[in-house]
Amino acid sequence: MKKLLVFLFLCITRAVFAQNSATDYIEQYKDLAIKEMREHGVPASIVLGVAMHESGNGTSKIARVLNNHFGMKGLNYNQEIRSQYKSYDSAATSYADFSMMLKSRKRFSPLFDTCSIYDYKAWALGMQRGRYASNKAWASRVVAIIKKYNLYEYDNRPADYVEPTYELFPKSVKLKQQVSYHRIKKGDTLSALAKKYGTRAEKIRHQNHLKTDYLRIGQKIKI
């Protein structure tokens, strides 16, 4: 019985520590994530979720010694640790490099045009398909972190944003979007819909083969 109690105590202690380290990490780095979202268009939830997953909430050796929060590989100028992972002068530099990597590499850059800024699930899956990580459960784990800590609250979503319904299967990493249409009501405009769904008016126009910005009440359009 004594051994069981000790075991339970250790489990509870570890869970509390993990929770505290996660919340501490969010509080420390949320402003950096929001900054990257505003400057480069990567959802803050994705920035934070990936950083928390890859760095163990900032506790990993490469995060502590190399300031590498995203598992980025490359040149390491730090003499304290011999590693294939890149070293940075600061966490802020690591965050900025993450955003620039997504924008500059062909397998990730399409995410900025095809994914809503508010749709963290699509971003996570897109990064998975772009081979950001080899583990097929990577996207679902990042999404789980975002949901657990409500990181989507930092994405500056409109109050009336409608979150798409997805089925995310870790093993096959398939994403099925079940909500993809909007029925036009009085007052709807392309720019307003683009803001509501986190996309661009030009994209909505192209998807629906619209020659003008005119929308008809009752019209069903693809988002």
Image: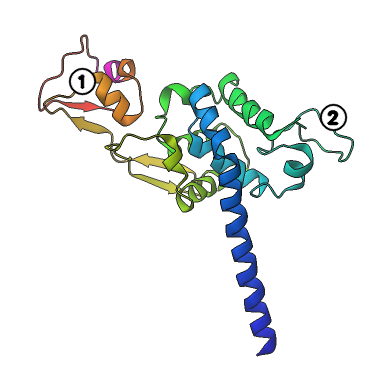
- Picture quadrant where residue 99 is located: top right
Q: Is residue 153 left or right of residue 94?
A: left
Q: Which residue is located at x 61 percent, y 47 percent? A: 25
The disc label shown at residue 189, or none: 1
**x%, y% of residue 51?**
61, 41
- Judging by the rendered image, the residue that carries numbered circle 2 is 77
- Residue lying at the far top in this picture: please name it: 211
The disc label shown at residue 124, or none: none
- What's the distance in space between the residues labelled 2 and 1, CA to CA? 52 Å
- State yes or no: residue 215 in magenta: no
- Picture quadrant where residue 200 is located: top left
**x%, y% of residue 81?**
86, 40
Q: Is residue 215 left or right of residue 32?
A: left
**x%, y% of residue 115?**
42, 29
Check the image and report above or below for 72 versus 107.
below
The crowd level at tag 1 (other Cα within 10 Å; few <14, some 14-19, many 20+) is some
Which sits earlier in the primary sequence, circle 2 or circle 1?
2
Q: Which residue is located at x 50 percent, y 35 percent? A: 44
**x%, y% of residue 152?**
43, 42
- State yes or no: residue 207 in magenta: yes
Q: Which residues are magenta?
A: 204-209
